[in-house]
Image (cartoon, rainbow, N blue to C red):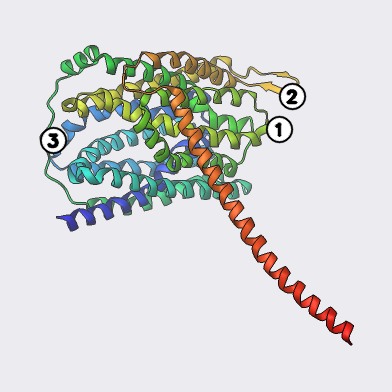
Amino acid sequence: MREHIRESLRFAYLEGFFGAPIATITSGALLTGFALYLGATPFEISIILALPFVTQIIQLFGPGIIDTFGDRRAVTAYGTFFARLTWFPIALLPILLMYGWDPIPLFLALAALSLIFYNFGLNSWLIWMSDLIPRNLRGRFFGRRNMYVGVVSTLVLLGAGVFLDLFTRHNLEGTGYAVLILAGIVLGYFSFRYQMRVADAPEKTKESVSLRELMQEFRTNKRFSSILLFISVWTLATGIAAPFYYVHLFRFIEWTYSEVTIYAAIATGLPLIVQPFWGKILDRVGHKPLLHLCGTSVTIAPLVWILITPALAHLLWIEAMFSGVLWAGINITVFNIVLYALPGERKAPVVAVFSAVTGFINFIGMLLGGIVVSILGSLSFQVGEWQFVVYHATFFLSFVGRVSSLGLIRKIQEPEAKQVIVVAQMIASGLTKRISLGRQFWVFWTKLNGKNGTKKHGKNGKNAEVEQNNNQRA
């Protein structure tokens, strides 16, 4: 049995390895660049980037789909494969530009269809993996798989940026995107093959909870409702500006694909490195102080985006590192605090509803941001070296919303949580230990070199003295 699980884990790692490129190419910075190339307006971009969140509601129907087909492995593998295959006609959309046709409506329809297939597959995959992998191996499996996927995604991001810049210089930007998407689909096929080789597992007892019981849980569980209130306001605030950071880099800062993808690689790669650090602190101090510290710190990020001019764009590299580290703390805390607030027998169904609710709120936030940018249109004015552009309005609204949500953290019921000052002391202590260790190493290295130098000098001095005496005798 142990060997059976080990082989399935290996196939699951390979499935994630080959599936990561297409996921990276069809999301984030590269998706934004492709939408801009196809001629999407800011409002259309907000819809395109919001689709992954609103389609999370499909996960609520996942159990019914699994019951209908009776094979979680097939639902997962084929759902994910069809989601990736849907990008084949999307890769050909640049052809429509040659004939003067607007490809965005078809792009939206195909992207929505792809995400529907993907969410069917995601729901069944989570249930399947939780039944297949023993509880004592799950953390190790998901952590290692996320690390592999993160490394591949970062490399794909960096390579795709250089690749697209090369094609753009030859006025073949659309061709470059088509090649990337088609290559991702081919690799996705290998991912499908490996996923079909992962063993199925007997389905465990289902949690039968009606929608009425779930709503009752939302109302009566004060701890959960306080958490849901904070996360809802925070999600709405961050969603308003979320679609326009990369648009701002492309359109106002005028960065190349390479520069934008390097920024994206830093912002998404750093969380993979620092999440274990935040996880240790979370276990020791609780959720509230970590939300206070990271949430308050990352709240200033939208103001940085407002103040940065193209001449000071290099400062955004620092912002990427700063935000990447802090968002790692926020994400791991939000995920764990939801599980902390829920009763054990109702975790799975309530998490599904929670995911659908927060996804819908994120969708609303992004649409609001798109409406604001559309209303302001081409509004712009200059103040010295600084220039106001419409994207700044969404950044400012995001800042105000984040500040408003911070006060809701105090209402979260977590009696065992430590004070924020304890988190700051732990971070300071960790940094002090590392600095002290570095200082000790430096002193040791200096003494070692000095000792060797003294020995060498002493030996040379003795030889010089002998040589001088010999000369005197001569």
Residue carrying label 1: 311
Labels 2 and 3 touching (C-beta < 8 A)? no
Left or right side of 270 for 390: right
Task: Look at the picture and state if 299 lies above or below 429.
Answer: above
Relative height, residue 414 to residue 55 (above, below): above
Question: For the residue carrying disc 2, how many other residues have a C-alpha within 10 Å: few (<14), some (14-19), or many (20+)?
Answer: few
- On residue 326, which mark appears? none
- Which kind of residue does numbered mark 2 sit on? Glu
Residue named by callout 3: 68
Q: Is mark 2 on a helix, strand or loop?
A: loop
- Residue density around tag 1, few if under 14, some if 14–19, many if 20 or more, within 10 Å: few
**Residue 420: x percent and y percent?**
44, 23
Mark 1 against mark 3, which lies toward the viewer? 1
> Closest to the observer: 179 or 407?
407
Label 3 neighbour load within 10 Å: few <14, some 14-19, many 20+: few
Q: Mark 1 vs mark 3: which is more N-terminal?
A: 3
User: Residue drawn at (32%, 30%), measured in percent from left and top?
Assistant: 336
- Is 474 above or below relative to 169? below
